[in-house]
Amino acid sequence: MNIKEYLAEKKAVIDAALDEILPAEDVKPQTIHKAMRYSVFAGGKRLRPILVMASAEAVGGKGNDVLPAACALEMIHSYSLIHDDLPAMDDDDYRRGMLTNHKVFGEAMAILAGDALLTHAFYVLSHCLKYFPAESVNQVVGEVSKAAGTFGMVGGQVVDIESEGKDISREELDYIHENKTAALFVASVRTGGILAGANSVQMDALTDYARHLGLAFQITDDILDITGDSGKLGKNTGSDTRKKKVTFPLLYGLEESRKMALDESRKAGEIVRTLGNRAKPLEEIVLYLVSRDF
Amino acid sequence: MNIKEYLAEKKAVIDAALDEILPAEDVKPQTIHKAMRYSVFAGGKRLRPILVMASAEAVGGKGNDVLPAACALEMIHSYSLIHDDLPAMDDDDYRRGMLTNHKVFGEAMAILAGDALLTHAFYVLSHCLKYFPAESVNQVVGEVSKAAGTFGMVGGQVVDIESEGKDISREELDYIHENKTAALFVASVRTGGILAGANSVQMDALTDYARHLGLAFQITDDILDITGDSGKLGKNTGSDTRKKKVTFPLLYGLEESRKMALDESRKAGEIVRTLGNRAKPLEEIVLYLVSRDF
């Protein structure tokens, strides 16, 4: 299979679905709908929604049936970026080569746009009932809200903020990544699995896969912040160093970090191969992610 | 019935449930759990959760069965206050006589505490399954997320912010209040109704009741901002005038506004009387709200 084509096809389908699911810019109150759309359509690899779809397909479901749920995961990711970029948080002016939400719409609207995307994600999830039993939808709402909250993404962000400029241990670094990044990857594959009716063995494989993928993704991100091309990345490199963040290259050096990323991606691939041929895209996705330069 | 006793009893039950439902302060990451609890337990009338319980009881359900859902509505209210108070929004230092969240925990943590309360509300809603069918829980997630989003609370806040210092029409003022305030009241009574298995006639009555209650509540709030005792209110009066907000007293004068509030409360009472004796608390609540001085 050609993974680049696969990703491009999925991205096109997801972008079209997001366009349908988000209120139009001319719907009142216009400003907030513009602000929501600005960030959702400001680029992005659509990695989380693609994982939802690919995971559903890996266990025999239809990717297009889980599209609304996939979009919900992307909206949550998008909200987290808007709030992370705020002056009170990371204070970033650019993301993916474009001005951040608060630089365009102001801080108040950026806070509200994030709030609204998070809220709309649960609205969309609750309306996934066309193809799935209410029990499954409920389980997804439960798992996604846990992964996005203080025992997941928000919890990781809190510890990340509190750790800036401090010496932290490998355990603390793992905690940050497992929660800030990996939790939503895990929620994405599990959403696809739950809705497609995966059995418990399949669910375990998807979950383990996403944990290793999360780590591989994060280590690669840390490496690219040092070695990457800011033009391709769409953001300034070296920001981790400036913010005195503890990263994998800082703890282990670049070479060892590269090995660790490859090792994690290999583990993710091995796990997901147990699901058979339908899981091939999941295997290719993680290999693609560690070899990216953007 | 003695409405003050009724409200005090319900408030005690709700406070105990919130204490159980919110992660403890010593659970990692501690700071965010402290910040969440600080605002949830910084006073408040618990009006929305009481409406959830009273509405369930009004149609023959058990108030205690809907307690988790009631707590979810309070958490959403609490999140909205934390974000409203932020420097980028209303920039308030005090609420209910206490320092606002960002004054105690800093802006970053206040933004995250709000995010986390909103997220946890949906987690709690999705776990309401002990007593109710998944379909009902799903409907509640759908209605609450709509009422909290850009076609409800967030939408009202957006137009409110955009209207500051401008001349706005009665239609615009109604839009702000219907969305910023009334939408969550409506979602509260409907949550109680849905979970308690209300029929469509009962649901319509609850919905109309909450719309009139929302208006009566808002007009009273506007009046108290002019005539109230800042000690009893726990916040400075006159803030609407300072922020150049258009209010009911500004549009209609104090006397006419008082009449309007009473009129709305009377309408709410009439509607809810059609539900019979079990709805007596709902009738008393709205009368109590327009006669309050806090």
Image (spheres, coloured by chain):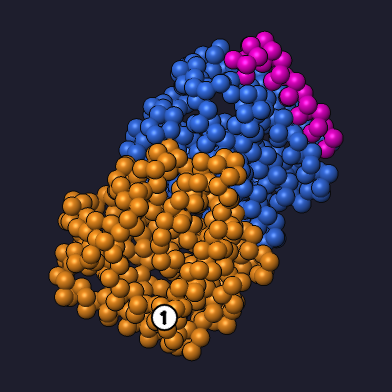
Chain colours: A orange, B blue
Q: Looking at the rendering, which quadrant does residue A3 occupy? A: bottom left
Asked if residue A153 lies left or right of residue A31, the reply is left
Does residue B258 lie above or below A90 as drawn? above
Does residue B244 lie above or below A34 as drawn? above
Instruction: Compare residues B186 and A46 and report the one nearer the observer.
Output: A46
Asked if residue A275 lies left or right of residue B185, the reply is left
What is the x, y in percent for residue B117?
48, 46
Is disc 1 placed on a helix, strand or loop?
A: helix
Q: Can residue B11 be seen from the camera position used here?
A: no
What is the x, y in percent for residue B192?
69, 45
Quadrant into which the N terminus of chain B falls: top right
Instruction: Compare residues A100 and B152 and report the one nearer the observer.
Output: A100
- Mark 1, residue position: A3
Asked if residue B32 lies left or right of residue B263, the reply is left
Q: Identify the magenta region.
A: B248-275
What is the x, y in percent for residue B122?
55, 53
Going 27% across and 49% down the picture, which residue do you hit?
A162
